[in-house]
Amino acid sequence: MPSGIESWTVIGRERAPVGPLEAHLGWLTSVERSPNTVRAYAFDLKAFWSFLESRQLAWKGVTVEQLGWFAEWLRRPAENVVLLDGARPARSARTVNRMLSAVAGFYEFHARRGERLALDLRPAAGRSGRGGGPVAFLGGIAAARPRGRAGRLPEARWLPRALSVAEAAAVIAAQRRLRDRFLFALLFGTGMRIGQALGLRHEDVLARERAIRLVARDDNANGARAKGSVGVVPVSPGLMRLLNDYMHDEYGALDSDYVFVNLWGGRVGAPLRYATVVDIVHRTRRRVGFHFTPHSFRHTYATLARRGGVPVEVVSRLLTHRSLATTDAVYSHLEVEDLRLELERAGVLDPPGTAA
């Protein structure tokens, strides 16, 4: 963009930006949505536009029924394949719902611009019990309940998977460079988002207090976005020692404001980008033999804190969630081992006469 902010668009068959999509994506950038958010919208709307072209449908004339066809199309493994009952769809209900939300946002944007549309997909249109909004239209495709957006597919409740302490230790031990070892140790020891880590500056490290200040910045040279509120998280002496080793042995006299930088490839000294972290994660997965993402460490940090009895409001502050409800909704669940621990603490796990 002229402002220097990275954005995304969708290129059509004429090798030019698709006008209606370009307007919407440009607006998202202008209202300071993150580049990652705009990118996700661009890919979702690219799929929608491909569907319209494959059916020769005009975007302004799309009906509720045709949007249902789009949802069905997204679930198919291939264009000429019909999904049978019990077969695994190409995309999960969660993914389809996300893509439908992107389409709804696209139509809401153009409706507010005064476009004459055959379909109004603003959120109110999908709510039940308020003025007789349209009935969910995916009957025959999948059972659906009108929750917020018309046509939303029912989702299985998703809970983040936490790594075991042994798995987290294996990932950290698998790193052959101090920079990468410190990165994963930092994610495990603070629960910060990968965007917060990649945007970390030397001034954010409070060595005397053994703490790290989390600052939400939108001007990081590597495009890292540190969403969430400003906060300070304590760190262990071991983590501070690992940082010192990284600074002394690998970082050296390099002149950069960023903690995580390129040291062996690309432009040396440039802040580390998320794409490089993805490459490191892929290599590490092959070494350790199990799947994980940088976000797995955040879930692990929060889950271990809750299992250890840390109050949810403290966990929320450490995670820099803007809302306590966000933390409570994700980390208030109890798995079977958590249930067992609570019962053992209460002394009611063993029936009378059965204790060893």
Image (cartoon, rainbow, N blue to C red):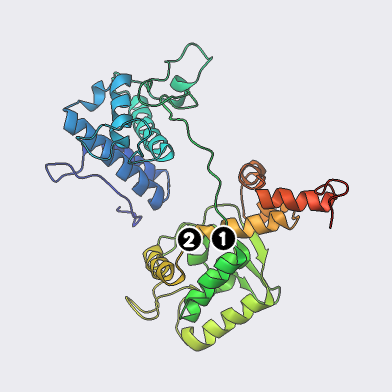
Q: Is residue 9 left or right of residue 341?
A: left
Q: Is residue 227 above or below residue 200?
A: above
Q: Is residue 229 left or right of residue 77?
A: right
Cα distance between the residues tagged 2 and 1: 8 Å
Whether residue 260 is visible here, answered yes or no, is yes
Q: Along the polypeptide, which appears first: circle 2 or circle 1?
A: 1
| Quarter holding residue 282 | bottom left
| Amino acid beneath label 2 | Phe
Using the image, tell me which numbered label, if any, was put on residue 292. Answer: 2
Q: Is residue 262 above or below residue 96?
A: below
Question: Which residue is located at x 84 percent, y 49 percent?
Answer: 346
C-beta proximity under 8 Å, tags 2 and 1: yes
Instruction: Pick the residue in front: 226 or 276.
Output: 276
Mark 2 Cα within 10 Å, few/some/many (few <14, many 20+)? Answer: some
Mark 1 Cα within 10 Å, few/some/many (few <14, many 20+)? Answer: many
| Quarter holding residue 53 | top left
Residue 193 locus on image (x, y percent): 53, 59
Residue 132 locus on image (x, y percent): 48, 11
Q: Is residue 326 left or right of residue 79?
A: right
SS at mark 2? loop
Whether residue 201 is visible here, answered yes or no, is no
Q: Is residue 313 above or below residue 114?
A: below
SS at mark 1? loop
| Furthest residue toward left | 14
| Amino acid beneath label 1 | Leu
Residue 21 locus on image (x, y percent): 27, 38
Using the image, tell me which numbered label, if any, was put on residue 185. Answer: none
Using the image, tell me which numbered label, if any, was put on residue 163. Answer: 1
Q: Quadrant of the C terminus?
A: bottom right
